[in-house]
Amino acid sequence: MSKFGLWAIAAIAVLTLLYLVYLAATFEAPTGTTTVIVPATVTQTVQEPALVAQPRLPQTRLQPPDQPPAVAATPVINEAPDEVEMPEAIVEESDSELVQLPSLNNSDEFLFEGLRALQNGAALVRVLANEQLLRSFVVFVENISRGEFPQTGLPYKRIEQEMQVRNIDDNLFVMDESAHARFDEVVELFVSIDTDQAMTLYRTLSPLFQQAYAEIGFRNVNFDDTLRSAINTVLRSPNVEGPYQLVKPSVMYLYADANIENLEEVHKQLIRIGPENAEKLKTKLREFSLRL
């Protein structure tokens, strides 16, 4: 394009720009058209915020809800010292009980240490089972509560001494009175334990007892209730006077008297330990029952 053409285009653009400036400077809004509404609308819009702002001023009442928590916090802060003292008192009173319990699988040593700390506890430990004592005790108590008496898994070491009997004839025997003496040591050790100390240890280990009880299917049953039921089962055992005649159709002796043989297994076991041992055991269990 030639230089003349470029200058011509530039001149046209300048003239066009000057014309637009002229129109803007000389423009007057025509009357009678709808555009006159624009100023009215602008005026109303400007006035509305002022009118709306006035009724919204009461919204400053939204601030008080933010203030009550601050007011309520004051009494809490003032009462805090009193509340702090209460937990401290509880901790001080229960320091001996708030101990870190072991897992159920590793509870033997913890339990044995607790038993050794009892009056005559060291001697008692020697006649107890060596492993999983807590679990064995729970199963033992559950059986006793139903009137049963387990033959295996006992929480104490099995007494090796055989029951002493005298022959009446080839098919009939009588339990010798000396047969009761083989249970004397176990019963004496049990009744010599301080009841309050034993109950403190039991309460300390209560979560583990409950856990062991849940393991055998009693998740929604309080073990305390089962222990109480087991004690009551022992306490209601009848007093049966000897001598006790026996028969031996197989390996084990049976009571020749059907009335005795048909008793609950735990009641028959109490006959085997003898009337004196049974009475000592019941007396001790009554003490435990009162503290449960």
Image (cartoon, grey):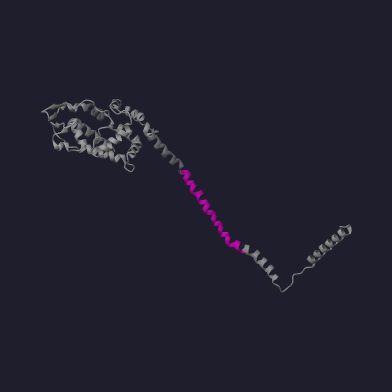
Quarter occupied by residue 256: top left
* Relative depth, front residue between 205 and 244: 244
Q: Is 58 colored magenta in this rendering?
A: yes
Q: Residue furthest bottom?
A: 32
Q: Residue at x 66, y 67 (%)?
A: 41
Coordinates of residue 36 in the picture (x, y in percent): 70, 70
| x then y, percent, for residue 216 | 32, 39
Q: Locate residue 242, reporting x and y percent.
A: 13, 32
Q: How many marks?
A: 0
In the depicted structure, whether residue 225 falls above or below residue 54: above
Magenta segment main secondary structure:
helix
Q: Name, please, the residue furthest toward the left.
A: 169
Q: Residue at x 82, y 63 (%)?
A: 16
Relative side of 286 to 40, left or right: left
Q: Position of residue 121 (x, y in %)?
A: 30, 27
Q: Is 112 rendered above or below residue 229? A: above
Q: Is residue 166 left or right of residue 199?
A: left
In the image, is 21 to the left or to the right of 73? right
Quick one: 182 or 215, which is closer to the camera?
Answer: 215
Give the magenta-colored segment's residue range.
Answer: 51-78
68 inside magenta stretch: yes
Residue 81: image quadrant is: top left
Quadrant holding the N terminus:
bottom right
Give the position of the C terminus as an image quadrant. top left
